[in-house]
Image (cartoon, grey):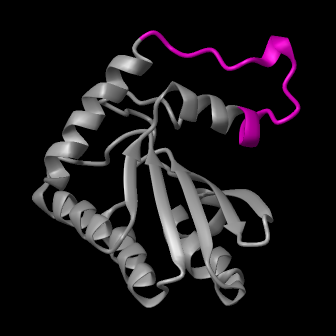
Amino acid sequence: MFQFKNVEYSSGRNKTLLCYTVERGEGQVFRGYLEDEHVSAHAEEAFFSTVLPQFLSSGAIKVTCYVSSSPCISCAACIAQCLRRNKTVKLRFVVARLFQWEESEIRGALRGISSAGCQLQMMKSADYLHVWQNFVEPDMSEQEAFIPWEDLEENSRYYEEKLAEILR
């Protein structure tokens, strides 16, 4: 949860975790996760180059990625290119923090993902709970319940406003 904490100044959080679900039309759901340091690439790039291709031949798919940080310029280009080439992919990115959102290139990259068809949204309490229950502690007991931090909702609203400004 350290990597997913939605603080504005993310000191020490220098890797990206990406938790994903891929839903096929037959009702099949596949789950997994990637993190930068274990895939020798950015997590987004690894997902779009190694995981997603396994599902592209199975018709329409719905992909939801819960990421600890919004994509860099290079990963955003990879995502947009993938969506433009694969019209059967419906993609939603649920993001904990915005990566270097003040930089104009990053803002443009996020707009590019959105215009390519990716639904971008910031994580809220319910999303954190979903990630906790489905990826972190799927066999959770009462003692291991997700405990939101004090400013989670306030930070989510802050980032929602910033994302809305960027996507205008």
Is 88 placed left or right of 59 in the picture?
left
Question: Is residue 134 at least partly visible in the picture?
Answer: yes
Along the line of sight, the residue nearer the viewer: 102 or 116: 116
Along the line of sight, the residue nearer the viewer: 50 or 131: 131
Instruction: Verify whether residue 112 appears in magenta.
Output: no
Is 61 placed left or right of 110 in the picture?
right
Is 121 placed left or right of 130 in the picture?
left
Image position of 72 with respect to 136: above or below: below
Percent across and percent down for residue 4 are 51, 36
Percent across and percent down for residue 35 are 61, 56
Quarter where residue 154 is shown: top left
Quarter where residue 65 is shown: bottom right
Tell me the quadrant of the picture where the N terminus can be found: top right
Question: Is residue 36 at least partly visible in the picture?
Answer: no
Along the line of sight, the residue nearer the viewer: 17 or 130: 130
Percent across and percent down for residue 159 are 28, 34
| x 36%, y 70%: residue | 117
For the magenta stretch, what is the residue range?
133-150
Percent across and percent down for residue 85 are 44, 90
| x 67%, y 20%: residue | 146
Query: What kind of secondary structure does the magenta stretch mostly adopt?
Result: loop
| x 38%, y 46%: residue | 121
